[in-house]
Image: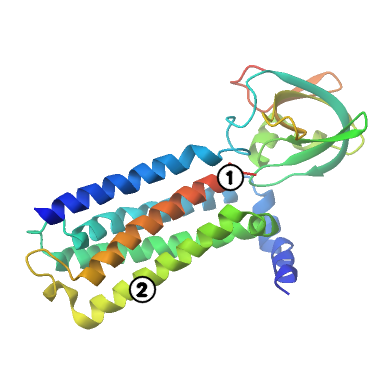
Amino acid sequence: MFTKTVTYTMLSAMYLLILLLLPSTLAAHHGWGWATSEEFEITGEIVDIRLGNPHGEVDLLVENDVWVVEVGQPWRNSRAGLTENLVKGRIITIHGHRSANKDVRLVKAERVVIDGKDYNLYPNRES
Amino acid sequence: MLEAFIASLDQSPLALMLRGSLWVYPAVNTGHIIGISLLFGSLVPLDLKLIGMWPKVPLAPLLRVLSATAALGVGLALVSGFLLFITRASAYMDSTIFLVKMFIVAAALVNGLILRVVFSCRNLPEWVIDGVAPPAVRLAAWFSLFSWSIALILGRLIGYVH
C-alpha cells in the first residue's frame, strides 16, 4: 500500500517536472512557433546556398545586411521546383515569417518569387 | 583532433549522401523513432514492474520478452542516430542540448547494462519477494524511467532550439 502511494507520487512528480521543462526553451528551426504570425516579405541577392537535410539555408544580401532564409528540406525544395533555381547572384523575393527575436535576421520561407515566378514551399499555407 | 575528426565526418561520402537525399534521410529519421518507441515501450512496463507495480504478475516472462525488444530498440536507435548525427556532425557538436542528451543517453545505457548484468548473474526474479525488488534495483528502475524520458525530450528539442 505504502509502496503504491510512493510510486504514484513519484511518477506524477516526474511527469510534472517534464511538462514544466518543455515550453521554456522552444526557439527555432522546425515548426512555426519561433516566428511571428505576421506575413513578412524581403528581397535580396543570393550570396550563399547551403541546401540539404534536415533543412536548407540561403543567405540573402539586403542593402548591407545578410539575412538567413530557411528554405525546405530536399524533398520540399524539389517539389516546389526551387532547388535548381537557387543560384548565387540571383535576386529573389521571400514571402514567409521572420523570427520573433528581432535581433536576428532570420526568415522562414513559405514562398519564393524569382523573375516573377512563384515557387511555393507550403501550398497549404497562406503567404 | 576531435574537431578534425568531426569535420571529416561532415565531408564523408555517407554524410554527403544523407544531406542531399530526398527519401533516405526521412527513412533514417523514421527508423530512429521506431527504435525509440520500441525501447521506451519496453522499458516503461519493465521499470514500473521493478518499482513495484503489478506485484502479482511474475517478473521472469516480462523480463525475457521486454529486455529483448528493448535491446532491439536500442540497436536501431543507435545506428539510425549515428546516421542522423553525421548528416550535420559539426552543427550537432555545437548544440548544448545535443551534448547533454548524449551524456544522459550514455548514463542511461550504463544503468541499463548494470541492471542487465544483475539480472543474468543473480537471477533477479528470485530476489523479488511479494512483488518488491531490492532497493538498488528499484533505484535503477527509477533512474531508467527518468533518464530515458529526459533524453527523449531533449532529443525532440534539438530541432527547435538554436
Q: Which residue is drawn at 37% across and 64% down?
A: B72
- The image's mark for residue B113 is 2
Give, as a three-letter code, the residue at label 1: Gly
**Could you tell me residue A25's position as x and y percent?**
55, 41
Q: Mark 2 or 1 closer to N-term? A: 2
Give, as a three-letter code, the residue at label 2: Leu
Q: Is residue A110 left or right of residue A114?
A: left
**Could you tell me residue A4's position as x and y percent?**
14, 52
**Given the image, what chain letter belongs to the residue carrying mark 2?**
B
Disc 2 crowd, CA 10 A, few/some/many (<14, 14-19, 20+): few
> Would you name the residue on which mark 1 appears?
B159
Q: In this view, does A56 lie to the left or right of B37?
A: right
One can see residue A68 in this view:
yes
**Given the image, what chain letter belongs to the residue carrying mark 1?**
B
Whether B82 is drawn above or below A95: the answer is below
**Could you tell me residue A47's position as x and y percent?**
88, 39
Label 2: which secondary element:
helix
Whether A97 is drawn above or below B157: the answer is above
Q: In which quadrant of the rendered image does the N terminus of chain B lie?
A: bottom right
Q: Quadrant of residue A95?
A: top right
From the viewer's side, name the closer residue of B135 and A37.
B135
Q: In which quadrant of the rendered image does the C terminus of chain B lie?
A: top right
